[in-house]
Amino acid sequence: MEEKDWDDEECDDTPTMTTVSRHCFGDDSETPSFSISIIENMKEDYGLFVWPCSVVLAEYVWQQKHRFSGATVVELGAGTSLPGLVAAKLGARVTLTDNSTRLEVLGLTWGVWDAPLFSLQPTLILGADVLYDSNAFDDLFATVTFFLRNSPGSIFITSYHNRSGHHLIEFLMGKWGLKCLKLLDGFSFLPSDKASLLSGNIQLAEIAPISKDNA
């Protein structure tokens, strides 16, 4: 369930739209196990809004909770960080990353090999709607591939709007020596109360490296 409270403020005659969204997780929608409230700003930039792909990925994290308890998780392009926060609630050790200076956790620019990158060895890598800028695709997959190769057995789980067909993901995976372990319709596992608030062709993929034996 998602609830939003709107607060319109005036600043230099330009309305600022701030909302607090509440996201509930549990096997029973009437008595959720926990909820996460996120302040969203509709004026500032894309990173300060909870996009549908984040809702889908966060729900998947909840439903896969047995995989996240005790796991080491990195969320790429975290923005408002809903999937990563759910993972943390489930007992994962989570590092949130973004290239925005507003995020005071770890700044990480895809394709740039800063020292903090080498200290991260996640077992699960999350990315919600990170496939939106074609100019950043190679940098994104370079970073993902580094994590997957540097942490044997790790998996990249991403939700994305299928804007140009799965063949784009297939091309990128082939280019970077990766394979798709699972491909799901994002609405196939979403509770009806959440699905009714979202739209679009959203898919979720689990991605891993192709082993050298199978290369």
Image: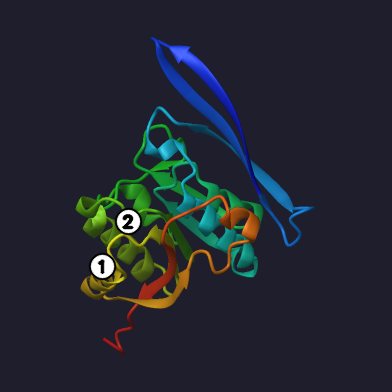
Q: Residue at x 48, y 51 (%)?
A: 52
Residue 190 rendering spot, x and y as whole percentages:
58, 62
Farthest bottom residue in view: 213
Q: Residue type at mark 1?
A: Leu
Q: Residue at x 34, y 41 (%)?
A: 99
Labels 2 and 1: the sequence-earlier one: 2
Q: Residue at x 46, y 46 (%)?
A: 51
Q: Which residue is identified by label 2?
A: 131
Instruction: Answer whether residue 126 is visible to the viewer in this image.
Output: yes
Residue 106 rendering spot, x and y as whole percentages:
42, 42
* Label 1 CA crowd tier, 10 Å (few <14, some 14–19, many 20+): few
User: Please, is residue 1 above or below residue 72 in the view?
Assistant: above
Q: Which residue is identified by label 1?
A: 168
Residue 114 rendering spot, x and y as whole percentages:
29, 48
As measured in the structure, the alpha-carbon distance from the residue carrying label 2 to the one carrying label 1 is 10 Å
Q: How is the image coloured?
A: rainbow
Checking the image for residue 155, the label placed there is none
Residue 130 rendering spot, x and y as whole percentages:
36, 53
The C terminus is located in which quarter? bottom left
Q: Residue type at mark 2?
A: Leu
Farthest top residue in view: 12
Compared across the picture, whether 147 is left or right of 8 comes to left
Q: Secondary structure at mark 2?
A: loop
The answer to whether mark 2 and mark 1 are in CB contact below 8 A is yes
Compared across the picture, whether 152 is left or right of 197 comes to left
Query: In the rendered picture of this protein, how many numbered marks are placed on residues?
Result: 2
User: Please, is residue 44 above or below residue 107 in the view?
Assistant: above
Instruction: Answer whether residue 122 is visible to the viewer in this image.
Output: no
